[in-house]
Image (tube, rainbow, N blue to C red):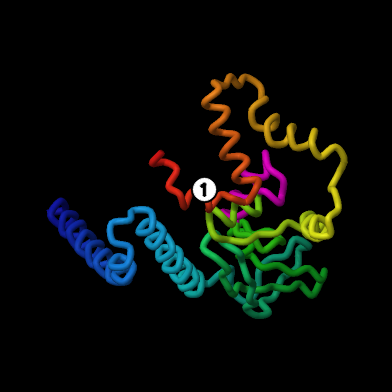
């Protein structure tokens, strides 16, 4: 009997899944008609729709939760009690876009401390990045500058992020005025374009392999990435 009930629920889940897919396809009907058999354009249309639906779903989900409310009072580290003040809003930059959420805010009259328990349990820091977006940024920043990381995050996820250091340096303003950033531009280019990628420990390259990687690296650094991929290079 248990197996029968389990199969029944699995069948219901499968039916609901199929219904969702049908509705999802209806949302994309115009794009499917316009793009025809172009796999790349259909892939991009599906991805954009998934992001839009995911953004709406995430915002609805966090909007329905208690978000750190644990009653009228919670214990403070000083030994006193923090009193619930109100639910306060906060904007979080996620992989799916900006999400506005409200969470419980507590204040201790004894020591003056305050906190939002939801921020702590959810891993939200003082910055506006969500844990997933912050992880992606940090992963890229291991090898890349903040500027390059920002550009790659925008290319991969469609999200524009800006590091404080990048904003303070304002490299774009200096370059726009024609200033050289640093000395030895030619030597620096050789090191950055070639050395940083090809001269790492343990790497052995064939002529064809190094040429291909450098071609991709140059197209990225010259802001020609979309132009290259619009020509369907995998077909070549």
Taking the spot 80% from the left edge, 58% from the top edge, the residue there is 170
Query: In this rendering, does residue 168 appear at all?
Result: no
Taking the spot 57% from the left edge, 62% from the top edge, the residue there is 94
Q: Is residue 234 magenta?
A: no
Indicate left or right for 84 with 20 as reference: right
Residue under numbered circle 1: 228
Taking the spot 28% from the left edge, 57% from the top edge, the residue there is 37
Segment tinted magenta in the rendering: 131-148
Q: Which quarter of the image is occupied by the N terminus? A: bottom left
- In this view, 133 is above or below 70: above
Return the x and y of residue 193 as percentages of the image width and height.
Answer: 69, 36
Q: Is residue 143 magenta?
A: yes
Q: Nearer the viewer, residue 177 or 72?
A: 177
Indicate left or right for 133 with 144 as reference: left
Query: In this rendering, does residue 175 appear at all?
Result: yes
Quadrant of the rendered structure where residue 184 is?
top right
Q: Which quarter of the image is occupied by the C terminus? A: top left
Task: Give the prevailing secondary structure in the magenta stretch.
Answer: helix
- In this view, 236 is above or below 93: above
Taking the spot 53% from the left edge, 53% from the top edge, the residue there is 226
Quadrant of the rendered structure where residue 125 is?
bottom right
Q: Nearer the viewer, residue 110 or 174?
A: 174
Return the x and y of residue 27 as percentages of the image width and height.
Answer: 32, 71
């Amino acid at each position: 009997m248990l197996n029968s009930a389990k199969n029944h629920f699995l069948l219901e889940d499968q039916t609901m899944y199929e219904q969702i897919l049908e509705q999802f396809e209806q949302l994309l009907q115009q794009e499917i008609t316009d793009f025809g058999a172009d796999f790349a354009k259909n892939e991009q249309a599906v991805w954009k729709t998934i992001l839009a639906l995911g953004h709406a779903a995430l915002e609805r989900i966090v909007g329905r939760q208690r978000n750190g409310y644990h009653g009228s009072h919670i214990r403070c580290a000083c030994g006193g009690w923090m009193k619930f003040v109100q639910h306060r809003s906060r904007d979080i930059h996620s992989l799916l876009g900006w999400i506005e959420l409200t969470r419980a805010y507590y204040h201790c009259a004894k020591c003056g401390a305050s906190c939002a328990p939801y921020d702590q349990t959810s891993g939200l820091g003082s910055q506006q990045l969500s844990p997933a977006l912050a992880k992606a940024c940090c992963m890229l920043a291991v090898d890349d500058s903040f500027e390059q990381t920002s550009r790659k995050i925008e290319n991969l996820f469609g999200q524009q992020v800006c590091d404080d250091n990048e904003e303070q340096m304002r490299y774009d303003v200096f370059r726009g005025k024609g200033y050289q950033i640093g000395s030895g531009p030619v030597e620096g280019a050789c090191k950055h374009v070639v050395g940083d990628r090809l001269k790492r420990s343990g790497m052995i390259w064939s002529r064809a392999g190094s040429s291909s990687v450098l071609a991709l690296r140059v197209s990225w650094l010259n802001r020609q990435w979309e132009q290259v991929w619009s020509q369907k290079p995998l077909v070549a």
